[in-house]
Image (cartoon, grey):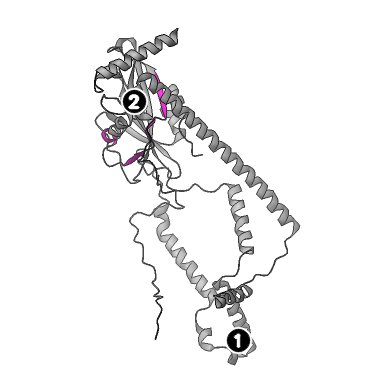
Amino acid sequence: MALILRGSVRALQAAAQHIASRSMSSVAAGKWQIVGSACITRPPVVCPPMTSLEQQYYEMITTIEEENSLKSDHEIRVEQDRINLEIMKTGEADELDLEEASKQTAIEFEDSCLEELKSFESTHLDKVNHEVKDIKSINRALERSLILVVKQKVGAAEEWVFPHTPWQPGETLRQTCERLVQETCGSDLKVKFLGNAPCGFYKYKYPKTVRKEGFIGAKVFFYKCQVRNKDGSVIPGTNIVDHQWLTQDELDTRLKQSYAKSISKFLVSDR
Amino acid sequence: METGSHERKAQALIRKRQKVTMREEVAEQRAQLTKQWSQYKFEQHQKEVTVLKKIIVARDQALEELRQESEDLWLEAIQVDHVLLPFKAKGPVATSPIKDYDTPDGEYYNITKKWD
């Protein structure tokens, strides 16, 4: 019975869609307001350090590889130099080409290479290991993936959420999210959306005083996107009070519990 | 081509390493480590598969909810995204990049053949 009713309601809706043009709000004004939201992630820039098991395994396979390999040019040079040194000690120097012997030996070459590496490391190490403490910066926590969280007005209060904006008739949900990224983060941040489909949703009811226009509440549809330029910065839009780049564990401290639960369904942890 | 294979055989003889007799403990330890590694990698793979299933379920739920709201938006959401693939991404590097590093040029060796 309920199915038949639903079917007839759908037929009516389809007829209404045929008559009215797509841009009319009657198409999507069901009971819930449709809101598009963007989950903007910055993937990790640097590899995390190896765990102890990974380190042990790595050492083992490198030794096995070395055992099964052939000698390189450098190793043959080292051996030849050792033989030449023996010859020079015993005094049969006439068999040896003195010009070749006065050239740099293989071990000396290896030492000079190691010294060059040390000097490079000492000049550039401090620049490499510079950890950024600013929680608003996109360059913090380079080994983890970061997600953008903003302080936006949700109803009456300001709350920490993923950036969101209500859907406007005449655009697809993905276009809503693309417009959202432009408005919220400015044009400096280049993002790539991962598909046309939303990755998750969150439903919440408006308080009874605000239930005008027939909307009981809002359905927020999340779209996943990745930051493409790692040196891009967020230029906050007009309705953004504050923004932060957070790792997934830090999200739980910032977001509300029910919101965080819907978020965790589609977020991929990097630990 | 024949000279090439002769050269290769000669090189293989010169560059051959001496076989080191392995102690039993070392062989034992290697077998143990290989087993631990295969277990570790299997667990990692299982986690990845679970995460993928979770993501697909979440996406399907979202699509279902969207369909309940608006058939049009649902139809547009299930369209194939032709811009997405081929998907290119630069993976993580071993050390973080040095800002404004002036990369020096390498050495050039001219290997053009000369016929006199």
**If the image is split into quadrants, where does the C terminus of chain B sit?**
bottom left
- Residue A156 is situated, as x and y percent measured from the top left of the image, at 30, 18
Above or below B44: residue A198: above
Q: Is residue B53 left or right of residue B29?
A: left
Three-letter code, disc 2: Leu
Chain of the residue where label 1 is placed in the rendered structure: A
Circle 2 residues within 10 Å: few <14, some 14–19, many ≥20: some
Q: Residue furthest top?
A: A1
Q: Start and end of the magenta stretch?
A: A182-203
**Residue B73 tag number:** 2
Q: Which residue is mark 1?
A: A88
The chain ID associated with circle 2 is: B
- Measured as percent of width and height from the top left, residue A170 is found at 25, 26
Q: Amino acid at mark 1?
A: Met
Where residue A28 sits, quadrant-wise, is: top left
Residue A263 vs residue A10, the one in the foreground: A10
Q: Is residue A65 above or below residue A74?
A: above
Disc 1 and disc 2: Cα gap in Å? 86 Å
Q: Is residue B102 magenta?
A: no
Residue B56 can be seen in this image: yes
